[in-house]
Image (cartoon, coloured by chain):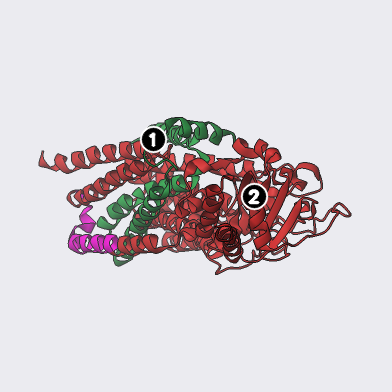
Chain colours: A red, B green
Amino acid sequence: MLALIPPFIIGAVDIAAAFLFMFGLKRMSSPVTAASGIRYAGFGMIAAILASFLYVFSVDASARPHLLVNVALAILALVVGGSLAWLSGKRAAVTAMPQMVALYNGMGGGAAGAIAAVELFGGRIHGPTALIVTLAGALIGAVSLSGSVVAWAKLDGVLKHPLRVKGLQIVNAAVMAVIVAIGAVIVVSVMTTFNIVMAPPLWIYVFFGLALVFGVLMTLPIGGADMPVVISIYNACTGLAVGLEGYVLQIPALMIAGMMVGAAGLLLTLLMAKAMNRSVANVLFTKFGDEPKVAKGAIKGELKPTEASDAGVFMRYAASVIIVPGYGLAAAQAQGKLYEFVKLLAASGVSVKFAIHPVAGRMPGQMDVLLAEAGVPYDMIFQLDDINDDFKTTDVALVIGANDVVNPAARSDKSSPIYGMPILNADQARQVYVVKRGQGKGYADIVNALFYADNCNMVYGDAQAVLIKMIEAVRGLTSAAA
Amino acid sequence: MTHDLAMGGFTGLYIFMLAAFTGWVIIGRVPAILHTPLMSGSNFVHGVVVVGGLAALLNAATPLQQTIGFLAGLLGAGNVAGGYAVTERMLAMFHTSDAKTAVHPHHARHHAKHAKKS
């Protein structure tokens, strides 16, 4: 009778945790309640982790002699892994959020893969269904681990250029086919206890090794601007892997949390791909921007550079300004200076709004977080559909570190690789200023017709330096008047 | 710990189906402005994998299993702690221009409506 108590407590705590995860995510659907949402989910998590120590009452006979060591290892893992990640998460710059999320996500995938490995090596998995589910979760988790690490390296600037080798897709397909075949070998040899070429444990090593390699090969060719899609996909993958291993371990809380995140990640992935007018497969498998995509003779006019101070003063006397931030703002860490400039403009009676493209930055919504960090209230921030009609009645569009998301070629030029992608209509403002580090092209290597338009001036320089000059110019006006 | 799959395949599929539907519906309502914290928050939620990692580690019977189980616990704990730390930080940053009336239910709904379209 006593033996029934620990499983009952675990069950009760886990169902409460599953509820808190759902309730917490639900509360995240509004900026007003979002902060409490993560706390509810956090309570659920702590309870579930503490309750999991009650598994000591139901361990296998083979593990019983090791129980003390295992409990010590468990506490050590929680303390070391938890405190290292906690500190890194607290210390990371807000501009580094995409790579931190990628990293923590990879850890989750790795944990799911490791669970599968323990269960497989321990010989605790029997029956075809359980074996196939374990292996599927292992594969997805391992791919998510190595893929996320590559994504982290790209976002963190460790890996600078996407690797593009001809025929890589064929290699990837071949590797995947081999992984599936090895999975089949493992299932058959475990069920028949008959060694096919070598013993099952050796096959398991090869299986995991190839899965990790596949994740690397899969992610290497994908470029920086496609990272919002990639991060969403791996988030969904880890969720799926966690859900599958949850079934293997017969822990419904893992199944619910994993599958819920899997579906959520899938939805976000589709939203991102739609915002770029490309399919998810296109993002993953096409070598975007490989061939020269310059429409011949389509660009008229020339680039017209101007001084930052002139642009600043012009905006001070405008009635309305819409700011279009892009990854360049994050790279230059200029969000604080930008809001300082915006406050100056607002104090002079200029109406200022921010326009955010869904795929601006390196993960979905990165610009929103960046501006929030600088202190910009979220009711000044508008999404594409809400603000796109306002550009034509606006005096100045200030584009900072954004490029492809304001390229009018997406509307008109059928030969352009970004044709059909919804863009911000910055070109329709009376005057456009583009703050850019140099004359280089955007990520997609497409010439931007906006920069050559009659109503557009270029302000060259690092976004931070440019904004400081703009602030000084506007301040100079005020002090001269006084 | 037993792996007799007391929960049958179809029961598992029912749980998966309902959970997936729940995730889809909840996230479909989130405004685009919250996409990053949301992703980070869902990243934290799948950190519950650490519970599975601990279960596997406690049942480890060989040094190899103990090593991999330890790794599962370590990575899972990293997922949980890191995911929570960054999500909480990001959410703490969002505020409106009118700090006194922090509640703008109309505004939030307005954004939510457009999140689906974008």
> In this view of the protein, can residue A482 be seen by the observer?
yes
Q: Position of residue B44 (x, y in %)?
A: 38, 49
For the view shown, which residue lies furthest in the front direction?
A: A482
- The image quadrant of residue A15 is top left
- The image quadrant of residue A391 is top right
> In this view of the protein, can residue A175 be seen by the observer?
no
Say if A213 sits above or below B20 in the image: below
Residue at 30% over, 42% down: A40
Which element carries disc 2, helix, strand or loop? loop
Q: Position of residue A313 (x, y in %)?
A: 64, 56
The magenta stretch spans residue A177: no
Q: Name the residue beneath numbered marker 2.
A: A317
Q: Quadrant of the N terminus of chain A?
A: top left
Which element carries disc 1, helix, strand or loop? loop
Closest to the observer, A261 or A414: A414
- The residue type indicated by label 2 comes to Tyr
Distance of mark 2 from mark 1, alpha carbons? 33 Å
- The residue type indicated by label 1 comes to Val
For the view shown, which residue lies furthest in the right direction?
A: A297
Q: Position of residue A447 (x, y in %)?
A: 77, 56
Closest to the observer, B19 or A118: B19
Span shown in magenta: A58-79
Q: Position of residue A318 (x, y in %)?
A: 65, 47
Say if A461 sits above or below A104 in the image: below
**Left or right, A16 with reference to A279:** left
Question: Which chain contains the residue that carries disc 1?
Answer: B
> Overall secondary structure of the magenta stretch?
helix
